[in-house]
Image (spheres, rainbow, N blue to C red):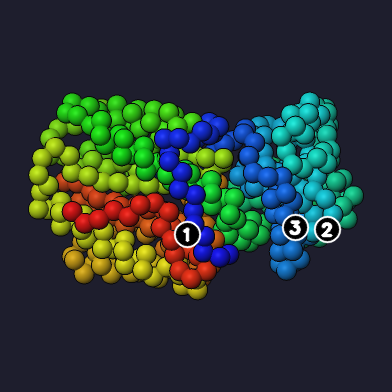
Amino acid sequence: MKRRTFLKTSFAATALTPIGFDHLAGSPGEAGVHAAIEIPKSVFGARIGRAQKLMAEQNFDLLIATPSTNFSYFAGYNPGRSERLIALLIPRDGNPVIISPSFERERILRRSTVTNIDTWEEHENPYKLSASAAERLKVASGRIGIEPTTNYIDYLRLQDQLSKADVRDGSPVFDELRMTKSPEELEAIQKAVDITVGSIAATHRQLKEGLSEQEVAGMLSREMSSHGVRGGGLVQFGPSSALPHGGPTGVKLTAGTVVLIDAGCSVDGYTSDITRTIFWGGERSAKYREVYNIVFEAQQAAAAMAKPGVECQELDRAARRVIEKAGYGKYFTHRVGHGMGMDGHEHPYLVEGNAYKLKPGNVFTIEPGIYMLGDFGVRIEDDFVITESGVEQMSPKVSKV
């Protein structure tokens, strides 16, 4: 992938289709469940081709995905999970097939890029139908990779019907494909980043004494909604900001308070994840300045390490060295970052022990933090993409205070 100039749309002028968004524990969750992804159909065909090539390399004969972001990654649509089995089967050779309740066929056919659909009636066993499809595809006795977020009961029932097969975790294929983002994916992520940064800034401008964390969180969501997307985030005042995944509560804003906002939205099924920490209502305290600038330097140290071929854990180590040297090591309590794309948290994870070497197209956060319980916390989080020659920051760089 050549180093590219990302689409820097004015978030105020962006017209986008609202996408479902579930904000859990401070990060965008599975986004766009029940929504078709507005990416050219040819992209999904190419993804299946890449999957089949990787399956051959890793000796998988079949991949099975139930509704999830992995299902949507290949089919362009997530029909949602229920007690009725829907499953996507991708053979090493040939065309993929979707197993579906017969009454759901038309809905899936209208939105999915996969048009081969085997249907089952309410009185029939869909897991047996899946095994029959695998027999037809000549892969029923091969190595089968199951999508890693599949419900355990679905896994057990598929395994029972595919008794001749070697059924195992399909993560090696799914994760490898998802980690490298295409230009279309990068464009969607960039739009989400632009809207999130702008929405946080607009929310900051509306802060006033007496507002609660919950009220400010509502402002943030409305800002995102005004630009055609659904999103939200954590809003934490003062001592609450020392909880990495705390708030929002009914706590009221007062002058001289640290305000932390961790936010994201979803554009075309792809997420953003940005955190900004400010000191509101008066001159910044010396302690806040010290801590904020240490976190800033830690983020810069990690970003300076990022380039193709560098292990993920090296970025975590770089940020941690800065914070530990400043005497705040025990207050940095989480990894320095995580991958993002269709899920708010996905591979690669920037954490000690992860020797995965960064590649062009990897998108991730760098988000060091210092959290002093009972006092305040600071986190600075931005989104980055690895290019052929180094790294590009997708969100505007902040500065020292």
Bin the neighbour count of mark 3 within 10 Å (Cα to Cα): few under 14, some 14-19, many 20 and up. some
Residue 265 higher or lower than 1, as above or below: above
On the rendered structure, is 193 left or right of 212? right
Dot 1: element: strand
Residue 84 lies, with reference to residue 186, above or below; the image says above
Front: mark 3 or 2: 3
Is residue 39 visible to us here?
A: yes
Q: CA distance from mark 3 to mark 1?
A: 24 Å
User: Looking at the picture, which amino acid does disc 3 mark?
Assistant: Gly
Q: Residue at x 41, y 58 (%)?
A: 393
According to the image, label 2 marks what residue? 93
Amino acid type of the residue tagged 1 in the rendering: Val
- As drawn, the label of residue 385 is 1
Q: Position of residue 167 (x, y in %)?
A: 73, 56
Instruction: Between residue 191 and residue 79, name the one nearer to us.
Output: 191
The mark closer to the camera, 3 or 1, is 1
Q: Are marks 2 and 1 in contact (CB under 8 Å)?
A: no
Residue 30: x and y, percent?
Answer: 54, 41
Q: CA distance from mark 2 to mark 1?
A: 32 Å
- Would you call the spot at circle 2 few (<14 residues within 10 Å), some (14-19), or many (20 or more)? some
- Answer with mark 3 or mark 2, whichever residue precedes in sequence: 3
Provide the residue designation for mark 3: 49
Q: Amino acid at mark 2?
A: Asp
For the point 78% across and 28% down, which residue is it?
106
Residue 240 percent coordinates (x, y): 24, 40
Q: Secondary structure at mark 3?
A: helix
Look at 62% across and 32% down and name the residue there.
34
Res 231 visible: no
Q: Earlier in the sequence, mark 3 or mark 1?
A: 3
Q: Element type at marker 2?
A: loop
Name the residue furthest bottom: 309
Contact (CB < 8 A) between labels 3 and 1? no
